[in-house]
Image (spheres, rainbow, N blue to C red):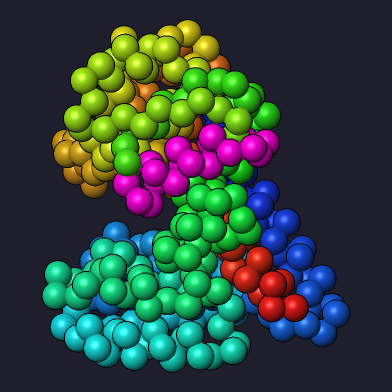
Amino acid sequence: MTLLDGKKTSADLKIEIAESVKEIKSQGKKTPHLAAILVGTDGASMTYVNAKVKACELVGFNSTLVDLPEETSEETLLNEIDKLNNNDDIDGFIVQLPLPKHIDEQKVLMAVNPDKDVDGFHPTNVGRMTLDLPAFLPATPFGILELLERYNVKTSGKNVVVIGRSHIVGRPMSILMSQKRAAGDATVTVAHSRTKNLKELCLQADIIIAALGIPEFLTGDMVKEDVTVVDVGITRVADDTKKRGYRLAGDVDFNSVSPKCSYITPVPGGVGPMTIAMLMKNTLLACERKG
């Protein structure tokens, strides 16, 4: 069993991106610049945004944080997005989700200039991805592809089951894995809460990507020998034995599943670190596209 180490792979990626940034600067070209908009004080969102700011510093990017209070109106937020869209120094930006209930998330994502949409959520980028045209890929699926490629996990002709159909992970993952690419050419099944024969499907799968948000849902009796398992989930589960009072659990019961695996991602330290690294990669691509 080999661990698909996202922590190490993302660190390698950041070193590669930092080298590219040094090269850009040595040629007198513009330093890549990533901005983030954070609305409110959601703990997880603040943690993610701070991690993105630190990653920018590490690779040599410029970064800007637009920090807005919880009560910010939709109109004010759209005005801030418009400013970033029209700021030539900003190569890419993200609007941290989730947003407060009074703001229409879809309207906000639609307002982002697709050329600066380094999260890959705008319909233009989703459409281009679907048609296999150059596009910003959503950071989490992009990170999973990168992990599979770097560990030389064979995907061509394999049966892949994606558990979860979200727009952020499940659906784009199913499209990307079926396309002609290094980590692709697979036969993909998308499973979800209405799937009747999920265990049967999983037992036939060579690769399982679990992205449904239910802790330790995938268990050892649901997988075959030599399977590759990618665990996208991360949930805080109450645990009195831990100092913090909780532990982080993925969608996969690691203890029962891992003995059967040829490859598996840990939680934490698997897919999570890759998401931020790929956001950096998308920002570098955005900067390079502008020449």
* 56 lies above or below 262: below
Residue 177 among those drawn in magenta? yes
Residue drawn where x is 31% and y is 23% of the image: 218
- Is residue 291 toward the left or the right of residue 111 in the image? right
Point out the residue furthest to the front here.
131
* 106 lies above or below 170: below
- Is residue 91 toward the left or the right of residue 93 in the image? right
Point out the residue furthest to the right here.
27
The quarter in which the N terminus is drawn is top right
Q: Is residue 259 visible?
A: no
Residue drawn where x is 21% and y is 72% of the image: 104
Q: Is residue 141 visible?
A: yes
Residue drawn where x is 21% and y is 39% of the image: 237
x%, y% of residue 172? 44, 46
Residue 221 or residue 19, whichever sits in front: 221
Residue 132 or residue 268, whichever sits in front: 132
Residue drawn where x is 24% and y is 88% of the image: 75
Residue 99 or residue 65, whichever sits in front: 99
x%, y% of residue 46? 33, 67
Residue 66 or residue 191, whichever sits in front: 191
x%, y% of residue 119? 47, 63
- Number of marks in the image? 0
Quarter of the figure with residue 108:
bottom left
x%, y% of residue 291? 75, 78
Residue 202 among those drawn in magenta? no
Quarter of the figure with residue 19:
bottom right
- Is residue 59 toward the left or the right of residue 159 in the image? right
Quarter of the figure with residue 178:
top right
Tell me the magenta residue range. Answer: 166-183
